[in-house]
Amino acid sequence: MKLKSFANLFLMLFFVAFSNIKICLGDCDNLQDSCPAVPPNKQTIFINGLQCKNPVNVSAQDFRTTELSTAGSTDIFGASMKIVSAAEFGGLNTLGLSIGRTDLDGNGLVNFHYHPRATEMIFVTKGVLLAGFVDTKNQYFQKLIKVGDVFVFPKALFHFYLNTGFDEATILSVYNSQNPGFVSLSPTASDTTLESLDKIKRKLISLSASETHDVNSFISPQMESIYS
């Protein structure tokens, strides 16, 4: 009888304890107002995150960055992408955020990629773009977006954006992780020719008749192996 009572008490305590545990769906909540990071090259301890600066050395400058004031270098797809995480912008440390900027030449493309630790939300400041993503059921979702529009890419799903105009386009991004990560499809030598790049763009545009699609005929072997 005592053993049964003890078992019941244990189960009740177990239920109460675990029903009050907060699950972290993004980065965990910070335990203080702010925690600007020590630059990575000056870290003296290694933790899941970044070491905080000494509070007496924290200033307003720690919460300001000019990283997004200019575009980055342009790649073979006619796009430049900057992701500014807590490692580059110390004031973001423990806040569960990163920011980004992407600039695309006319007909420029940010090829399929994903962020393993973050959802990405984009805001168009210039141009007209085709934005889309593929879910784990190989369903394809895309939308034409313009200045002032916001589009969201769910965490860890392959996505892209294509400048559909002749003028440059710019988007700003927010990620719900201080270290979102970046994984892209590695182009082969044959994928970097102008002919193959145009072929990729034509495939994306050809799917734009509807906003959702079965994309089995389009997905590359690399995406198929990840989602299978």
Image: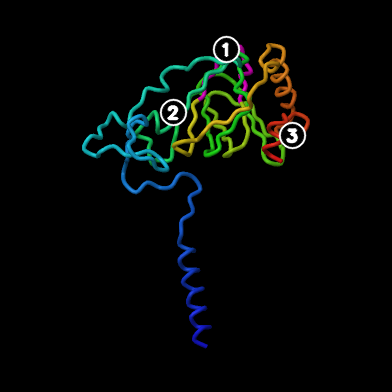
Identify the residue at horizontal 32%, vertical 41% (top origin): 34
Residue 44 position, x and y percent, is 32, 37
Whole-angstrom CA distance, mark 3 to mark 1, is: 28 Å
Q: Quarter-wise, where is residue 190 in the image?
A: top right
Q: Report the residue marked by disc 1.
A: 167
Residue extending farthest to the left is: 56
The correct choice, above or below, for 136 with respect to 197 in the image is below
Residue 175 position, x and y percent, is 49, 35
Disc 3 crowd, CA 10 A, few/some/many (<14, 14-19, 20+): some
123 or 132, nearer to the observer: 132
Residue extending farthest to the right is: 217
Q: Secondary structure at mark 3?
A: strand
Q: Which mark is residue 213?
A: 3
Q: Which residues are magenta?
A: 161-171
Q: Earlier in the sequence, mark 3 or mark 1?
A: 1
- The verdict on residue 184 being magenta is no
Q: Earlier in the sequence, mark 3 or mark 2?
A: 2
Q: Closer to the camera: disc 3 or disc 2?
A: 2
- The verdict on residue 168 being magenta is yes
Identify the residue at horizontal 21%, vertical 38% (top origin): 56
Q: Report the residue marked by disc 2.
A: 84
Q: Would you say 35 lies left or right of 100 here?
A: left
